[in-house]
Image (spheres, helix red, strand yellow):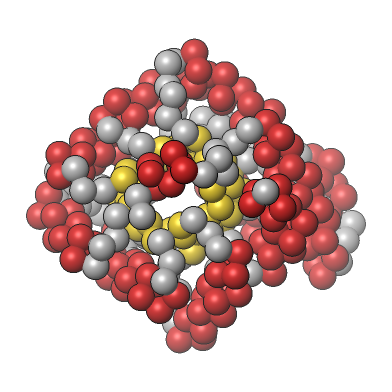
Amino acid sequence: MKIRELLKIYPILLSFEFFPPKNPESEGVLDETVSILKRFNPDFVSVTYGAGGSTREKSLHWTLNIKEKYGLNVMMHLTCIASSRNDIQAITKSLKERNIQNILALRGDPPEDIPDYAIKTDFQYADQLVDFLQERNSFSIGVAGYPEGHIEAPSLEKDIEYLKKKVDAGADFIITQIFFDNDYFYNFMDRIAQAGINTPIIPGIMPIVNIGQVQRFTQMCGATVPVHLLDRMHTMKPEDMINVGVEYAIEQCRELLDFGVAGLHFYTLNRNKATEMILMEIEGNIRS
């Protein structure tokens, strides 16, 4: 079902993000994760797309596999970096044939081995991809939002200008990059309102279960981890971090639900335990 229709039916959506596994062992981990999290009846799940389309075939395979094997409503990420119109048309044709109705349209990261990627692609920005997809009028299209601003944006104001271009091109909903301080999200919502953007916003949540991994991830996307949480975790054994990270994420989610968000989108990193622990505590708030 199209996510834009789900947003009209349900006050709060629940969704999970997965990425294509790299080897047979990782495939088994993802299968186990999907089968466990399926019991929470997500409204949709998403499958990511590597830099420059580097996981194109795997992303398409797992999008179709999760839909067919688990009967879940799947959204495929689609990046336009290093992609031609023919590339995008071929992918969307495959999605239509399998009744995949949702796409998260992204610029994506330029591949390291193609420094002149802008010359080799028909699309340079996500709003151009949204516009191209919107012409076909077959998909519900989501785009990314950045509560702390995109790492390449010159200012928070410019970042919202770029987001508005994506919305004006035809995006139905916005899923945010991760953030660990809800004040960033609330300020983001204020900037969106001032810009006249009325598109539903679904915050992205990632519980901190491994401090090193989160620090590497946040360096890439610019998200800020609260100092008090870092200080607390630095004194802990790795096996104890998950309980603290989950506890923090539960409170973060409860505050967001009280605020009235359109849904919660969990970045699972292909693992089920932390997301499962959170949902065991807040499921009633989502499905009430």
Where is residue 152? Give x, y as percent.
44, 33
Residue at left offset 55%, top offset 63%: 41
Depth check: 162 or 200 in front?
200
Which quadrant is home to the N terminus? bottom left
Residue 243 location (% of width, % of height): 82, 61
Is 6 on the left or on the right of 247, as rendered?
A: left
Left or right of 117: which side holds 16? right
Q: 106 left or right of 241?
A: left
| Residue 138 image point, x, y percent | 21, 48
Report which quarter residue 24 is drawn in.
bottom left
Residue occupying the point 42% across, 29% down: 199
Q: Residue at x 76, y 50 (%)?
A: 250
Residue 285 visible in this rendered orientation of the protein: yes
User: Which quadrant holds residue 161?
Assistant: top left
The correct choice, above or below, for 207 with respect to 62 in the image is above
Residue 94 at least partly seen: no
